[in-house]
Amino acid sequence: MRTASNILHLGIKELRSLYRDPIMLALIVWAFSFAVYTAATAVPDTLSRATIAITDEDRSPLSTRISSAFYLPYFVPPELIDRAQTDERMDAGRSTFALDIPPSFQRDLLARRRPTIQLNVDATTITQAFTGSGYIQSIVSGEVNAFLRRYRATEQLPVDLALRVRYNPQLSRSWFYSVVEVINQVTLLSVTLTGAALIREREHGTLEHLLVMPLTPFEIMAAKVWSMALVVLVACGLSLTLVVQGLLGVPFQYQGAVPLFLAGAAVNLFATTSMGIFLGTVARSMPQFGLLVILVIVPLQMLSGGFTPRESMPEFVQIVMLAAPTTHFVSLAQAILFRGAGLSVVWPQLLAMGVIGACLFGYALTRLRRTLSAAT
């Protein structure tokens, strides 16, 4: 009973200390609001308002049809230019794509001569160049095939492909990236807040005050874990409700998705806050801790399956990342929020995060005991 009371009061002390730190409070607010909104709406991984210029040397109904097939939001309205202007516009960065439709294109196509359209791409904007080339090829092919159907019968495929997009029928990237960013901020802030709380005790000299009290390392660590985890969990819940669902309009599959997700986030926070305590025992100062956080957070975010599917990673990386709690947290979050999975589906991820969290907590507690022993 005394241990629980000590943990409660020490945790309240941590919350008061955080309340007096305006920089940390501003970081929490920014991370779960503006950072989430920006990541959902401004990540340049898909084609958006790409500039395209078209040289129409054919002036036929087909070339006009192709020119009018590019429109918002993927392309700005195309500009019709002469061939001599192509290099000048691309050198000046005014056109990412330049499409050249040759003379007699429609006539040669109807005569089955297989004419060629030239597409010039400014690859300095690599993301739009890579994605846009495929978009333009698909648009031109679709317009050509639709035009040819009016003049001659085309061979029909023996199988029709019926495309049904589940969970995100409009393929809206904001649905995906907003949730991924919330997951990333949960990991980042839980590690940062707990580690910084421990180092702040050392730098302010209050760690020595704790050592002369009848407190155990377990009580000190548990207090920092529950208090910082509670802050991140509350901020996460507000972000999902106000920013993701409210501002961005991302729908979840069923009404109880958010509570179940927060339960999974709480288990994940048990692991990541323990990781923060461990890093706080390794670093001797706040700058060292910041560098360690970068070395740990970047692999956790890049290799956990949030940005890139784990199946596309090397098998060795997939096996190693199973030891990271974020890998199971990303899988759990996507299953609950996107696919409407229930507890009967995500319990293996919850169990894995709990086991990893227990291991990290135990190892971090051992490191903390050594650190406190050295301080005395």
Image (cartoon, rainbow, N blue to C red):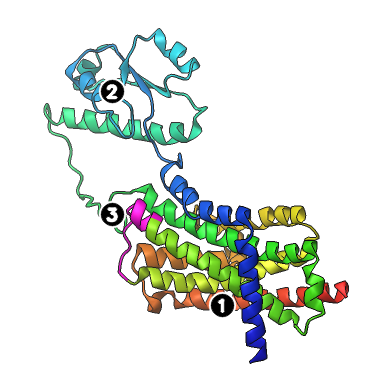
Side (left or right) of 63 relative to 231: left
- Image x and y of residue 301, in percent: 57, 56
Q: Which residue is mark 2?
A: 114
* Quadrant of the rendering where the N terminus is positioned: bottom right
The CA span between labels 1 and 3 is 33 Å
Residue 165 is marked as: 3
Q: Earlier in the sequence, mark 3 or mark 2?
A: 2
Instruction: State which mark lies toward you, 1 or 2.
Output: 1
Q: Which mark is residue 354?
A: 1
The amino acid beneath tag 3 is: Val
Q: Is residue 102 magenta?
A: no
Q: Residues within 10 Å of mark 1 (few under 14, many from 20)?
A: many
The magenta span reads 243-255
Amino acid of disc 2: Arg
Residue found at x 75% / y 79%? 217
Looking at this view, is 263 or 356 the one in front?
263
Residue 373 lies in quadrant = bottom right
Picture coordinates of residue 360, whole percent (x, y): 66, 73
Q: Residues within 10 Å of mark 2 (few under 14, many from 20)?
A: few
